[in-house]
Structure formats: C-alpha cells, structure tokens
Amino acid sequence: MSFIRTSVSNGVGEIVLDRPKALNALDQTMIDEMYRTLGEWGDDDSIETVLVTSVSDRAFCAGGDIKSIREYALNGDSAAISRYFRSEYRLDQLIAEYPKPYVALIDGAAMGGGLGISVHGEIRVVTEKAMIAMPETAIGFFPDIGSTYFLPRLPDGVGMWLGLTGARIHGIDAVAIGLATHFVSSADLPAVAGSIRAGEDLVDALAKSGTSETSDVPLRKIGEYFADDNVAAIIGGLRGAVGDEWAQEMVGLLEKASPTSLWVTAAMLDAGAHSGLDECFDRELHAAEQITKTHDFAEGVRAVLVDKDRNPRFDPASVDDVDPKLVARIVGESV
C-alpha cells in the first residue's frame, strides 16, 4: 500500500502525503517513494514546480516512523536503523539542493521529519493551524533531519530553545523566526493551492493572502536564556528567573526531557553552527545510530508513543549526572 499520491499538471508536480491515521509519519516506503519521484521530476523539463501537500486536516507530517525505529533497536537490527536514517537524510538533502521551486503547504502539525521535507525547501507556507516543533529530547533522541544545520542559523538562541525544549510554535511565529517563508490563512489555502496547481506565478499565487497578526515569540528572553550551549547553565538561569512564568514553563519542558538528549542536542547544535549541511547529516547519522542503542531512547519512545503514559524513567535522571564520555561517543567527538 502506498502512502504517497502523485500527479502532474500545468508544469506542477504534486506529492500528496496520504497516511492520515499516522499523521503522515514517514515510513521507509514514503521516504523511498518521495526520493524516487523527486529525482525523476528534477530531470523532467516539463515540470517547473513541486508542490507537497497533505490529505490530513490535522497534520502535514508528524515526523519519522520512530516507533518502528524503536522496534528495530529492541531487536538489535542496526542495519534497518542505519538504512532508515541514511535514506531520510538523503531525501532531505535532495530537497535542500532541489533545482526547482519546492513548495510545502503546512496546515497542521509539522514535527521532526515533517520539517525535513519542508524547511529545506525553497517555499514553506504556514497557516494559523500550523504547529511546528522538534520534540525529540522528550523521547530520548535529538533534533535531526538537518536541523543541526538550520536551527543554529535562526535568530540568537532560538535554535537552542526549540531543540532543547521541544517548544511548539504556530503560524506567523514560524515566519518570524525563519522556519516558514509565507503565511496564508487556512480558509484561503485551498485557493492558493489551486492557483499553484493551475501553474500561476508563485509570487502572484502566494500574494492572495496574508495577515495583520504579529509574532509574540519572546526573542529577547530566548536570546538571554538560550545563548549558551551549557545545559546546566541554561536550566540554572531559567530556574533563577523567579516570577517569570515563561521561564518556569521552559524549565518544565526541560525537566520532561532526557538529560542525555539535552547534552547531545546542545553539542550537536554547537557543532552544526560551524558545519556545512552535508557535514551535519553525516554527524546526525552517526549520532542516530549511537543514541538509538541507549536506554533513554527505548524508554522515551515507550512513554510518549507506545504506552503513552508520559512518564519516562530516564537514566541518569539529572543533567548533572550525564557522562560527558557518553555524549562525546554519541556526537562523535573526543572528550
């Protein structure tokens, strides 16, 4: 059964994500089909634009098929884990280097792998229903899909904030921080999509809707609290902000995350700030292969996605007790 539908008309190739029961989580077949289709369309002179949409009114793409990755890990199938991440990152890099306009319409959740098949593209359109997040630290993993390249290039501290906390942003906020390029109201999105499918000029099609809303992302606070890559210092600074509800909310998010994942994420983002995209993908592949062997990954996915009790028992339970040698081994650096 295919979870990808494709069509070509008026010089526009459209990929429709069609796995609504799983919120379009990317399984191996979807990744392989998208890569094959995009490769063919990239060489097809009759196709001028690629459009990626979803059949679900709840999600663009909720991420990777992480439950299957956990099963592979529990079964010791490291080859399947490597194949999955290698092919996912290969797809993301193809999108980043795509020779034609690549347009993603996000009218719902776009998390993890969903950002891999959207943020790397030239045009990312969001609506007020769009919800964007990199929630990997809560499941004992780390933000991947090339995010260790694009997160550090957001405004000061924003990438570290999103990567460590898994905080969710919506609509116009995604445009304000650079994860999206255009805002379209959800009610107007079908008309915009129709204009693109009809082969209308992209600038004209995207100019049909906008918003007078302004972002309320607290950039000053984020830059103040998340400018460091020292996880303990970040948490300490937030805890010391007595009376600041936003800071205490962030502490709550960090306390739900795997301490090991927090340190790994900080190190990966710091390294990614000084690396090219291909280097980031290579580093992420190594880290993914390593971190999926840990207790925290199996436990985090169990608590959030399998049993859904939201009560993971991470080991160690405190950021102060995380072994720097383990973090270095996952990231691929010497201590």
Image: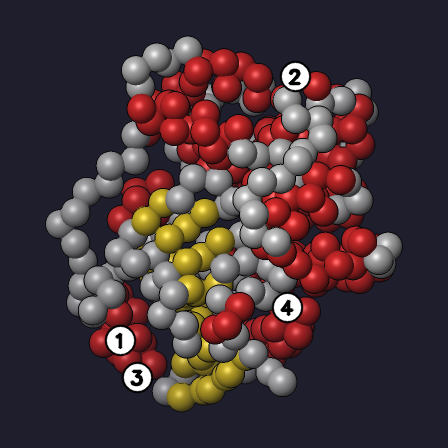
Secondary structure beneath dot 4 equals loop
Q: Residues within 10 Å of mark 4 (few under 14, many from 20)?
A: many
Q: Secondary structure at mark 2?
A: helix
Q: Amino acid at mark 4?
A: Asp
What amino acid type should be assigned to the residue bearing mark 3?
Answer: Ala
Q: Secondary structure at mark 1?
A: helix
Q: Is mark 1 in CB contact (under 8 Å) with mark 3?
A: no
Label 4, on which residue? 27
Q: Nearer the viewer, mark 1 or mark 2?
A: 2
Point out the image quarter for the C terminus. top right
Residues packed near mark 2 inside 10 Å, few (<14), some (14 to 19) or many (20 plus): few
Which residue is located at x 24 percent, y 61 percent? Answer: 184
- Image coordinates of residue 192 in percent, x first then y, are 25, 72
Q: Position of residue 260 (x, y in %)?
A: 67, 30
Q: Is residue 70 above or below residue 164?
A: below
- The label shown at residue 190 is 1
The amino acid marked with disc number 2 is Asp
Secondary structure beneath dot 3 equals: loop
Dot 3: within a 10 Å radius of its alpha carbon, few (fewer than 14), some, or many (20 or more) residues? Answer: some
C-alpha separation, residue under disc 3 versus residue under disc 2? 57 Å
Contact, mark 2 vs mark 4 (Cβ under 8 Å): no
Q: Residue furthest left?
A: 212
Q: Which residue is the site of mark 2?
A: 320
Point out the tag, 2 or 4, that comes first from the N-terminus. 4
Residue at x 64%, y 68% (from the top left corner): 27
CA separation, marks 1 and 3? 12 Å
